[in-house]
Image (cartoon, helix red, strand yellow):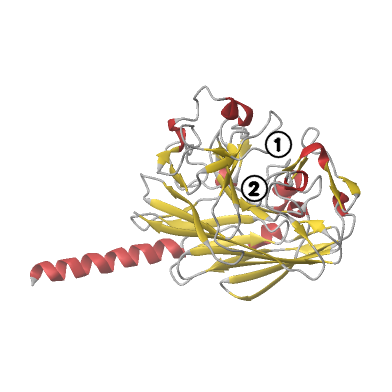
Amino acid sequence: MKTKKILFVIILLSLFACTKTVKELPLIDPLTFQGEQDGKKVELFTLKNANGMVAQITNFGGKIVSLWVPDKNGKYEDIVMGYSTLADYQKTGEIYFGSLIGRYGNRIGNAKFMLQDSVYQLAANNGPNNLHGGFKGYNNVVWDAVQNDESTLLLSYLSRDGEEGFPGNLQVNVTYELTDDNELKIEYKATTDKATPVNLTSHSFFNLKGAGNGDILDHSLQINAAFYTPVDSGLIPTGEIAPVEGTPFDFRTSVAIGARINEDNEQLKFGKGYDHNWVLATPSDSALTLAARVLEPASGRVMEVFTNEPGIQFYCGNFLTGKVIGKYGKVYPFRGALCLETQHYPDSPNKPQFPSVILNPGQEYYSVCVYKFSVK
């Protein structure tokens, strides 16, 4: 009986400690995001769930600014890279921390494509290629925002015909929801009045130790994919769908990200590490499948990624230089974060053998990404 009482007291103390930690989270002050861009009001919105998780999202680029997740001991850390003020995001070059990406996530080769016998020239903002929508993609526009409850945020944006070279007026609606199952759910919907390529994604940089707390090479990663799309030296897919078996790209069973990242492999050299698309076996346009799972062994934090997309881009911070100072004055080191971006394949408009990314009038684009958190 005495043992049971002691256990009960320990449980109560643990719950109190966890609750106290949540209340004392050093959240970003929404006042530091109040401002204007392009004549539209910018704000920072805070989402909470019943378990104490917190996400902060700005309507400037739909950026996930912070995401507070507990570890196996109930200690919370902000696990996404970002900045503490709107001014910092506005003056910084294109790192895409936490951004919504569109109209086309990832790269389009030679910054052009042909659709219905017309050639569309896009901005060449990544060498000769188009990356993440161009010089002013969806990461750099102000979205209309509606928050009706403390767990959900709806962002809307009308991308005009000809914007960054893309055809059609595209109405985009993105819903962020922080569920009581400890999921950050991102739901994308879009309609168009003219045929156009659409490939929307989120570019959040995760470190399950806490952003700025070292690199991610000790994170264990599993990707449920038997194939990937090799790239050329400009990171444009060659068109081949290659097996991962026998290569450093085989994450079908969980392995530390740093275990093979420095192997003598041409694809790893092209990406300066991992910066590739994996081919997922998705059952249908609406059903979700487990695409990837990440474990950080010290904290015990686990992140699972579910999606209805046919691909997922795994990027491990190869272009972080160690010179960026983010939130709380922390330096973001080389390979200090990973991205798992659910999407269609890069350069699909120029690769007819890849799943189509063309949205036609009368159709609705629908994509879902769920980042689910737990502990081990």
Instruction: Establish if 98 lies above or below 227.
Output: below
Give amino acid for label 2: Phe
Quadrant in the picture for the C terminus? bottom left
For residue 60, side relative to residue 340 (left or right):
right
> Which of the pair 200/182 is nearer the observer?
200
Q: Nearer the viewer, mark 2 or mark 1?
A: 1
Does the residue at mark 2 contact the one at mark 1 (Cβ under 8 Å)? Answer: no
Residue found at x 82% / y 40%? 111
Instruction: Establish if 211 lies above or below 238.
Output: below
Residue found at x 37% / y 56%? 375
From this viewpoint, which residue is outermost toward the front? 353
Quadrant in the picture for the N terminus? bottom left
Give amino acid for label 1: Ile
- Which residue is denoted by mark 1 in the rendering? 236
Residue 317 x, y percent position in the rendering: 58, 37
> Which of the pair 90/209 is nearer the observer?
209
From this viewpoint, which residue is outermost toward the top? 264
Residue 221 x, y percent position in the rendering: 45, 44
Residue 273 x, y percent position in the rendering: 56, 31
Category of crowding for the residue at label 1, using alpha-carbon neighbours closer than 10 angstroms: few (below 14), some (14–19), many (at least 20):
some
Residue found at x 9% / y 69%? 2
- Which residue is denoted by mark 2 in the rendering? 97
Secondary structure under tag 2 reads loop
For residue 250, side relative to residue 152 (left or right):
left
Secondary structure under tag 1 reads loop
> Which of the pair 292/243 is nearer the observer?
243
For residue 264, side relative to residue 366 (left or right):
left
Q: Does any portion of residue 52 appear in the rendered image?
A: yes
Task: Tell me the number on the disc at residue 157.
Answer: none
Instruction: Establish if 287 lies above or below 79.
Output: below
